Image: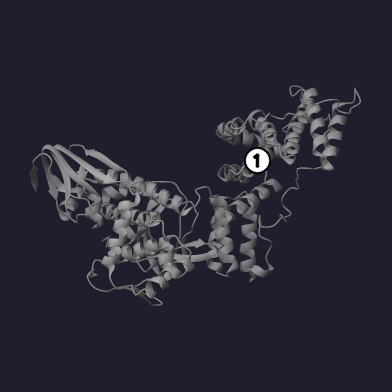
């Protein structure tokens, strides 16, 4: 049914109830509505041939906007059944509307989550495993098995996939949560399958004979994985790092290098070893000075010194972090993510950057980094440390 | 309800037994579902407890967000009894629409309603005082049933846990507000329902609050 309106007429008011859906034939129509989260008044012009009043008519709820004409205007008013008949013949229109609606719904849901304080920053992989754990703990095994199976299907090459399989075996053998393995990430006791790794690692088993990184075959394959995926992702974070470094006037790593006690002519490896010994004794100040000396003396372009150079860079970061010099630490770790993202120190550096953001009270950024670390390979104790941090952060929300 | 022949069911149909998971929260999702038979419970695990968000009936659709976006499932769907569904992959969506325009229309209805519900929820959450949030949840619950006569007493089938969840509050806090409303004679509180004496009164309070919220 066609309806003609004079200029300035109201076709409907906000909060009216009506079943009609309109199509603008000629003239102009302005929709005015109030944004619910800010109270802001928004205006939108309907284009010729466009529908309006669709959602409220279909959903049978009050109009959310006021529709007013400018100039002589003709609209087509459709009842719900007219509208249904019309769109049944024109599926493309429906598809377009669905796209618009789905975008609106997604935006709304995001706002709702923000208002509720839910974070978008959860790690779906971890959460899926936890769903399985939940049902496992309460003894709802049908559901636990479903979640664990899905976990194994989507994330097959992970240590958690192994755990998921163990859980399924436990269930199938009639076991219960009580006699199960420890839940990963909730305690320090990581499963044995994790490589042992700690920041003050003393294994230091490199020598001049070591081939330059990527070193061992296993790590070689995974570090090429980094360079494809993770290098790009670390650069996506780099602006945040720059922000962090620039938003304070602290001097960066302002350590005087006066007379580090070192016999001249000692080999770089010896110097490095002394630094590491200090680090092991938690003597961070002394260790930092010596690591800095290695950094000055070593040349990353020489294959046999590159390893020492990068390890010193990393350890200097660890020392600075322990000394609560967050800026200094950030500089060291950021350099690793920028220039040495193809080495096995990348993950540790990313983890520490997370720690730095966390210490600086920037939980969201910290979470982003921990989530990255969670998904990096090879899986080792750094991954589980990252998960510990994620859980701790989410608990404090 | 969608009228589809058995051939269609053979291609897209799936069946689930009682307590079986159809999809799980945080699982990647590419399919959406139409319930043909049986009820489906939508649940989320919140603070280590499984909470039912919704119970869906034959004719209802779920998982529809997977049509247009690639996000993990935001809730778990569990068959409550023997359930029969039609299950569509997003890749078949266009073909499906062409062949079944009535399904397209149905999806429009569903999205319209979901958008309104989300907006309505947001309006509740944006109120600051807990007492107002609880009042507005009661109004919303009343609005959902067009059969109610707003000029007389209204009995809402809802408990304090559901009201708390709508209001985004801890159950204890919602309970406190409901107890207060009972004490001042605005509502009667039962285990499984709330009787509101004068819903117009609540509407006036909330409308006036909203009017001044941004000024």
Furthest residue toward right: A263
The 10 Å Cα crowd at callout 1, few under 14, some 14 to 19, many 20 or more, is many
The colour style of the image is one colour
Report the chain holding disc 1.
A
Regarding residue A241, the answer to whether it shows in the image is yes
Q: Residue at x 58, y 53 (%)?
A: A394
Regarding residue B81, the answer to whether it shows in the image is no
Out of B104 and A101, give the one closest to the viewer.
A101
Q: Is residue A128 above or below residue A42?
A: below
Query: Residue A60, image x and y in percent?
Result: 23, 58
> Is residue A345 shown left or right of residue B194?
right
Out of A253 and A334, give the one closest to the viewer.
A253
Q: Residue at x 38, y 74 (%)?
A: B182
Residue that numbered label 1 is attached to? A356
Query: Residue A158, image x and y in percent?
Result: 63, 50
Query: What secondary structure is marked by label 1?
Result: helix
């Amino acid at each position: 049914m066609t309806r003609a309106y004079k200029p300035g007429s109201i076709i409907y008011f906000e909060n009216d109830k009506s079943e009609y859906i309109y199509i603008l034939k000629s003239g102009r129509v302005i929709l005015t509505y109030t944004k619910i989260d800010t109270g802001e008044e928004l205006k939108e012009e309907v284009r010729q041939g466009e529908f309006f009043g669709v959602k409220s008519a279909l959903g049978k709820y009050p109009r959310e906007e006021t529709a007013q004409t400018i100039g002589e205007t003709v609209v087509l008013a459709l009842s719900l059944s007219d509208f249904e008949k019309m769109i049944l013949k024109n599926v493309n229109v429906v598809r377009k509307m669905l796209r618009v609606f789905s975008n609106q719904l997604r935006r709304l849901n995001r706002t709702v989550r923000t208002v509720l304080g839910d974070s978008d920053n959860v790690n779906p992989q971890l959460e899926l495993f936890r769903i399985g754990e939940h049902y496992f703990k309460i003894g709802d095994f049908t559901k636990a098995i479903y979640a664990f199976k899905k976990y194994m299907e989507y994330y097959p090459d992970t240590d958690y996939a192994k755990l998921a399989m163990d859980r399924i075996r436990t269930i199938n053998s009639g076991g219960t949560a009580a006699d199960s393995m420890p839940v990963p990430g909730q305690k320090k006791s990581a499963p044995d399958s994790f490589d042992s790794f700690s920041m003050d690692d003393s294994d230091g088993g490199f020598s001049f004979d070591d081939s330059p990184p990527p070193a061992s075959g296993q790590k070689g394959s995974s570090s090429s994985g980094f360079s494809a995926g993770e290098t790009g992702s670390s650069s996506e974070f780099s602006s945040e790092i720059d922000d962090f470094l620039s938003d304070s006037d602290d001097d960066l790593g302002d350590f005087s290098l006066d007379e580090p006690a070192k016999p001249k002519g000692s080999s770089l490896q010896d110097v490095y070893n002394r630094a590491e010994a200090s680090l092991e004794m938690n003597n961070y100040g002394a260790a930092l000075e010596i690591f800095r000396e290695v950094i000055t003396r070593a040349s990353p372009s020489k294959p046999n010194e590159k390893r020492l150079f990068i390890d010193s860079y990393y350890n200097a970061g660890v020392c600075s972090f322990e000394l609560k010099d967050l800026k200094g630490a950030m500089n060291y770790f950021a350099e690793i993510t920028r220039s040495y993202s193809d080495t096995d120190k990348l993950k540790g550096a990313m983890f520490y950057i997370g720690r730095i953001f966390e210490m600086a009270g920037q939980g969201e950024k910290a979470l982003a980094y921990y989530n990255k670390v969670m998904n990096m390979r090879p899986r080792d104790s750094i991954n589980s440390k990252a998960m510990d941090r994620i859980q701790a952060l989410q608990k404090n929300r | 309800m969608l009228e589809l022949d058995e051939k269609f069911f053979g291609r897209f149909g799936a069946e689930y037994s009682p307590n079986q998971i159809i999809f799980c929260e945080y699982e990647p999702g590419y399919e959406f579902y139409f319930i043909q038979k049986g009820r489906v419970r939508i649940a989320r695990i919140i603070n280590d407890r499984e909470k039912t968000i919704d119970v869906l009936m034959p004719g209802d659709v779920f998982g529809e967000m997977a049509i247009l976006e690639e996000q993990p499932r935001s809730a778990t769907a569990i068959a409550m009894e023997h359930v029969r569904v039609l299950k569509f992959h997003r890749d078949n969506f266009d073909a499906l629409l062409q062949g079944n325009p009535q399904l397209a229309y149905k999806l429009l209805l569903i999205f319209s309603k979901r958008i309104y519900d989300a907006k309505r929820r947001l309006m509740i959450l944006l109120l600051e005082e807990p007492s107002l949030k609880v009042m507005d949840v009661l109004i919303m619950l009343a609005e959902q049933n067009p059969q109610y006569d707003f000029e007389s007493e209204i009995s809402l089938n809802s408990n304090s846990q559901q009201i708390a969840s709508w209001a985004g509050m801890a159950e204890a806090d919602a309970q406190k507000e409901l107890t207060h409303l009972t004490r001042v004679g605005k509502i009667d509180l039962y285990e499984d329902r709330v009787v509101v004496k004068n819903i117009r009164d609540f509407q006036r309070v909330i409308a006036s609050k909203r009017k001044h919220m941004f000024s």
